[in-house]
Amino acid sequence: MPDSAPLVRIEGLHKSYGGVVKVLQGLDIEMKAGDRVVVIGPSGGGKSTLLRVLMGLEKIDSGSVSFAGKSYISADGGRTAIDAKVRRSIGMVFQHYTLFPHLSVLGNLVLAPMKVRGEKRAAAEERAMALLTRFGLAQKARSYPAQLSGGQKQRVAIARALMLDPKLMLFDEVTSALDPELVAEVEQVILQLAQQQMPMVIVTHDMWFARNIASRVIFCAGGVVVEDGPPEQVLGSPKGERTREFIERVFHIRH
Amino acid sequence: MTLDFAIVVKYQDALLLGLWMTLKLTLICILFGCVLGFLLALARTSSNVVLRGVSSVYVEFFRGTPVLVQLFWIFFCLPLVLGIELSNLASGVIALTLYMGAISSETFRAALKAVGREQMDACVALGLSPFARTTSVVLPQAVLRAAPTLLSNCVSLFKESALVSAVGMADLMFVGQNISNNTARPIEVLTVVALIYFAIAFPLTRAVTVMEGCILKKLAI
Ligand SMILES: Nc1ncnc2c1ncn2[C@@H]1O[C@H](COP(=O)(O)OP(=O)(O)OP(=O)(O)O)[C@@H](O)[C@H]1O
Ligand SMILES: [Mg+2]
């Protein structure tokens, strides 16, 4: 892939729930391979919806998404076509962990590699242990999700997504359900990934985290991109009135 | 009137044979009934209107009619409709399996609902195929969640199985009735029969409570 070709190209994306709740209304975003995009915006503005669309979890009304130059999601005549092979190169971590409660930590990590890629259990477990060790969770490999703290669960969820060697990671408010003292351990893991040049799209309300992780910040409101630029600019001296108002309200009061 | 429980001891072999038949019948019907119930639950939650309709009618019908009537219908009417002879065992198995399928499908349906959309999202995000989703995530979680209620369903089936004596299957109830008729000792014999049913069902109903606690703790995330 040439350096200039975008990793993700979203064009004219429209998405509604049942045709009534119009959430995304003509979204155009181009993301380069080196980008770490932080998406901010008012509650109900469609940030989660955008990530869910990118993960291939939602139907769209119109528009298209391509990934690494290949068509990934398209809408024609009320049907949404999603390329399952492309989808496999994208990983997502949700706000509420969504670990599989009936499987151990190790079981959670090896399930997809074994079922999706046909990897042997021994090989998958070896990779899983390496990841868990890196995330400081090796001693929890045999525990069940219910026995973990929120921060540990979320780190396991990140490790589980990484087991499939994603080319893009999506994080949807992954620390909002955590007790404040557990936020840092999860953010550290994501910062670690950033250092390894993992492309990512992150939805967060955490100003410190946004500043430290973003190479680019997008302010989404009313289903469109309102402002898009480097973090210093969008977070520090936003151009638009709406952006400024939002950032003052959400970030500066909290931090 | 004097009670003579020693008389029951004389007939213990016959009673044990009857018990064995009851257990065999119950276990077979639990097995088939649970498979049927799980499939019915999947059908009832499917997006296909026909599947949903057929399975709903089935479940509501079997939950809304007496098991005894179902049993008689299968014993007397089904052979006429199909034009084949059915053995006592076969009709007993069919009737109780259909009954178990109906009641366990409700249990599975509730459990499937509890597995929830977030788990499905996680499956899709991990690229799991619909088959892998069902067998590796949905089924084990649904079974775990359903286990306590399923066990109570099994206990109900075990008790309802006494109805097959009405169509002449030699189960515990049938044997007990015969002995009590022949010996004219209904109090002793039927009391013992009741105690045998109770001795098996009671520990199982206690187990349901214990199990509920354990499973809720494990699945609480
Ligand atoms: N499954 C759904 N069905 C119907 N409406 C939905 C559904 N999911 C989200 N919505 C609606 O779509 C809009 C956008 O929701 P979304 O979750 O994408 O917002 P968000 O920007 O992530 O907000 P938040 O910051 O609160 O997480 C909201 O009005 C929400 O009520
Ligand atoms: Mg959201």
Image (cartoon, coloured by chain):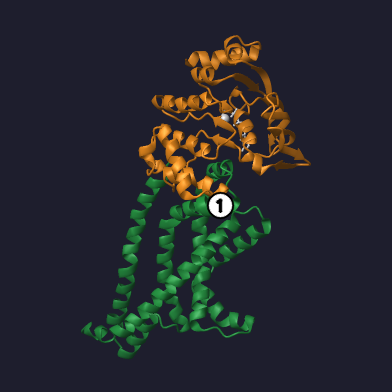
Q: Which residue of the protein is positioned furthest toward the bottom in this rendering?
A: B182
Q: Which chain is green?
A: B
Q: Quadrant of residue B209?
A: bottom left
Query: Residue at position x 40%, y 66% from top?
Result: B155
Considering only vertical position in the picture, is A27 above or below B217? above
Q: Secondary structure at mark 1?
A: helix
Image coordinates for residue B221, horizontal then vertical, percent: 43, 41
Image coordinates for residue B59, horizontal then vertical, percent: 56, 63
Q: Quadrant of residue B73?
A: bottom right
Image coordinates for residue A58, horizontal then vertical, percent: 65, 39
Quadrant of the image for the N terminus of chain A? Answer: top right
Q: Nearer the viewer, residue A118 or B14?
A: A118
Considering only vertical position in the picture, is B73 above or below A161? below
Query: Residue at position x 45%, y 46% from top?
Result: A107
Q: Which chain is orange?
A: A
Label 1 crowd bin: few (<14), some (14–19), many (20+), radius 10 Å: some
Q: Chain of mark 1?
A: B
**B157 left or right of A244?**
left
Q: Nearer the viewer, residue B220 or A113?
A: A113
Q: Which residue of the protein is positioned furthest toward the right in this rendering?
A: A77
Considering only vertical position in the picture, is B2 above or below A119? below
Q: Which residue is disc 1 drawn over?
A: B132
Query: Residue at position x 25%, y 87% from top?
Result: B10
Say if disc 1 is inside 8 Å of ligand 1.
Answer: no
**A32 left or right of A147?**
right
> Disc 1 marks which amino acid?
Ala
